[in-house]
Image: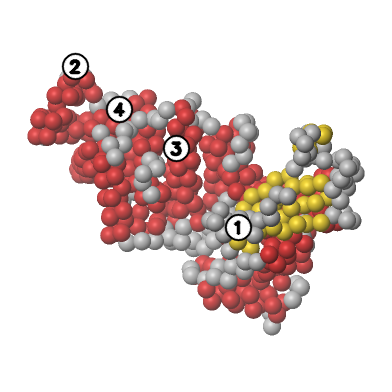
Amino acid sequence: MNEYALIMRHEDGTKIASPEQMQIWMKQTMDWIGSIAAQNKFVSGTGLPFDDALVVHSNNMVTNGPFGEIKETIGGFVIVKAESAHEAAEFAKGCPVLQGEGNTMEVRRIAKNDGTHQKFKRPL
Amino acid sequence: MDQQELIPHLFRSEYRKIVSVLCRRFGFDQLEIAEDITSETFLTAAQTWGCKGLPENPVAWLYGVAKNKAKNHLQRDLTFQTKVAPQVRSNFTERYESDIDLSPQNISDSQLQMMFAICHPSIPPEAQIGLSLRILCGFGIDEISEAFLSNRETINKRLYRAREKLRTEQIKIELPGRAEIDKRLDAVLTTIYLLFNEGYYSVSQNQVLRQDLCFEAIRLCQMLAANKHTNKPPVNALLALMYFHASRFDARVNETGGIILYDDQDTSLWNAEMIFKGGYYLHRSASGDTLSKYHLEASIAYWSTQKTDTKEKWESILQLYNRYLQIAYSPVAALNRTYALAKAKGKQQAIVEAEKLNLTGNQFYFALLGELYTGIDDQKAKTNFQKALAISKTPADKKIILKKIDALGE
């Protein structure tokens, strides 16, 4: 069994949800995670709040928040256990983030730290 | 209470106190001797009280006899004369019989220290529980075997190895330092928790033993809550959890020892005082910044003391299970979460979730599916109940499942 990171990508992080809407999403997210945990496939996870976020650019320039040139932001991630990327993708399908149009879930296998991660893309 | 009941009762409550005090005094080197002296004390009590009737103050009588026996042992023992005596004499200039201090303070301190010593990380968890049952709860080997659904030989071996470990590692009977307490407290709480579970969910048919286990667990946890060094939020949460559960003891079992399901329980038999205590400790647990699994379980147990079904209740329970499963997965919790989901969001959605659990070796998994399909697809409900019946073990479980099948009709 491998571990996969399910990364929540918001197409546009500048949209601010109402507190009521946030609360509904939180509950839905907890139900979604609870469902994975009930199958004993949950490893860990966390939300990544947008406030207090910084982006460090290649020339060491720091901008406040990922809301600059690119609108896309990462809202959080969950790490799950799964037999395959497709099983992990099945979990990802349940994430409430996908209710937002244009949002995506990225499924990435976690390297096992045992020397088998040659397929990493090198920085350009 | 007549003598027939009194001696076992005193054995439960006093055995651990005497052993802890003696053992603290002798050191783990002589754990067996401390246990022997204490057992002998009770044997003497049974014989003497049988002939002469009960003494005025049975507890004081026991302490007096234990003290004398310990004193005799110390005087008699050759090892004592050669190895222990010089050291003891240098530490204590008083005559050594006065060293056996059975004052309430010393009894309480000794037991707490004993708890932390037994739950030393060098001993495997099941041995910690076994040793706790033996030393802190005065359980006999037969009772421990029954509680673990194991045999005497296995338990004897397990306890022997654990005692050897305490000896060879030279584990001290003392409260660990402040930083160490938090680390070791986990193991202590796990032991108490498992002890309680052993009583609450035990497959053993011995009802008295089961309740005793639970109340012993509560007593031990109570001691932790009463000590300022160990009075931590998870301790209070665990205590709350146990009180909430124990409050339903009288309602859970019928005259013939069969289990009465939650929905069918007579709430007037729930113990209001224990529910109140549960609330008190749950309130006290709400400090600090760590959310332990005991906090979540205690909150779930709190909701179980509210019998009326409301949307708020089941939504809250569902959210608590969602978090609980993230930090402490267990098949039982997974099944319970799915049940809460059915109550909060309807059976259809819960069936989809339930099928994903795939706990096909678990009778409760099929029983849950049977429950969820009832009224939606009775044929499927029946098939699932039959699967549950086929793998259920106790007559009480079988009876409950058969009743469900009967209710479905043809």
Q: Chain of mark 1?
A: A
Q: Nearer the viewer, residue B313 or A10?
A: A10
Residue B81 occupies quadrant: top left
Quarter occupied by the C terminus of chain B: bottom right
Q: Chain of mark 3?
A: B
Q: Earlier in the sequence, mark 3 or mark 4?
A: 4
Position of B209 relative to B88 (above/below) = below
Give amino acid for label 4.
Leu
* Residue A119 visible within the image: yes
Please, which residue is most extreme toward the top here? B93
Give amino acid for label 3.
Arg
In the rendered image, which residue does mark 4 sit on? B102
Between the C-alphas of marks 2 and 1, the distance is 69 Å
Instruction: Give the foreground label among 3 and 1.
Output: 1
Q: Earlier in the sequence, mark 3 or mark 2?
A: 2
Q: Which mark is residue B93?
A: 2
Between the C-alphas of marks 3 and 4, the distance is 26 Å
Please, which residue is most extreme toward the front here? A124
Q: Earlier in the sequence, mark 2 or mark 4?
A: 2
Q: Nearer the viewer, residue B328 or B388?
A: B328
Between the C-alphas of marks 2 and 4, the distance is 19 Å
Look at 54% across and 56% down and name the residue there. Answer: A115
* Discs 2, 1: same chain: no
Give amino acid for label 1.
His
Q: How is the image coloured?
A: secondary structure
Q: Which mark is residue A117?
A: 1
Q: Which mark is residue B184?
A: 3
Q: Secondary structure at mark 3?
A: helix
Between the C-alphas of marks 3 and 1, the distance is 38 Å
Instruction: Give the foreground label among 2 and 1.
Output: 1
